[in-house]
Amino acid sequence: MTGTTLYLATFLLVDTAVLLGLLIYFICRRIKRRRIRHYGDRAEQLVEDTLREEFQGAAVLRNVFLPNGRGSTQIDHILLSKWGVWVIETKSHNGTIRASGRDWVQLWGDKVVYFHSPLKQNEIHRKALEALLREKKAFRGIRVRAVTVFTSDKVQLPRGKEGIVRLKDLARYVKGGGKLSSRRVPLTGELHGRYLDRQKILRLESYIKKRCVKSRRGKKEHERRVRRRDRNRL
């Protein structure tokens, strides 16, 4: 084998190894994304089932894209009920959750995963929905509340953080006006019935559905922005 032939063979072998490595990397990344999406979808379904069971006569909107100053923002659930308007962020994380500013940490065995603060994330959602409601005179003044719910039984939440609950406490938290303390008198349906009756709930639901982002392009741009933000953080 001549030197030139040996060089070409080595070059092709290295090139093939690099391409194979890249192929394996992209396949693994796609599998990981699908697995994360599967867990997320299952968690969102658990939350939706809980909301529909606990809040009879309410409107539950899922996976809503609303316009904001940066394009659009995605809300896992919007609850419209006589207990008010709530935006709900869903997390399926296991293990110990530590909160620190914009970045939170999940400790699960030997795994350490950083993720964007769901409280700050949900505050963006809350402001987007409030801004949308202010555009229509009939809905101005309606307060939008926010809560993040963790669906796993194997999660340890940070202490002293308001606005985050376990799935089993979600209905009590909403009906308690954002409190879990048994010393607080829950907000009654009669009180909110004068504020958000069934007809107003239906009008709110129709308005939000009409104003939400429906184009595939807008949704794809939002997904790219989220992935870009996560890559920059790691």
Image: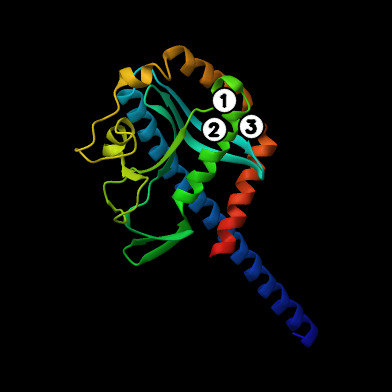
Rounded to the nearest angstrom, the CA distance separating label 2 from label 3 is 8 Å
- Tag 1 near tag 3, CB within 8 Å: no
Picture disc at residue 29: none
Disc with the residue nearer the chain's start (2 vs 3): 2
Graded by Cα atoms within 10 Å as few (under 14), some (14 to 19) or many (20 or more), the crowding at tag 1 reads some
Instruction: Reply above or below: 192 against 173.
Output: above
40 sits left or right of 27 in the view: left
The amino acid beneath tag 1 is Ile
The amino acid beneath tag 3 is Val
Which colour assignment does the render follow? rainbow
Mark 2 element type? strand
Depth check, mark 1 against mark 3: the one in front is: 1
| Quarter location, residue 64 | top right
Residue where numbered disc 1 is placed: 208
Disc with the residue nearer the chain's start (1 vs 3): 1
Rounded to the nearest angstrom, the CA distance separating label 1 from label 3 is 10 Å
- Residue shown at 31%/17% (left/top)? 190
Residue where numbered disc 2 is placed: 64
Return the residue found at the far left. 183
| Quarter location, residue 233 | bottom right
Disc with the residue nearer the chain's start (2 vs 1): 2
The amino acid beneath tag 2 is Val
Residue 180 pos. (x, y %): 26, 40
Mark 1 element type? helix
Residue 122 pos. (x, y %): 48, 44
- Tag 2 near tag 1, CB within 8 Å: yes
Residue where numbered disc 3 is placed: 213
Please state which of residues 226 and 38 is positioned toward the viewer in this rendering. 226
Instruction: Reply above or below: 97 against 133.
Output: below
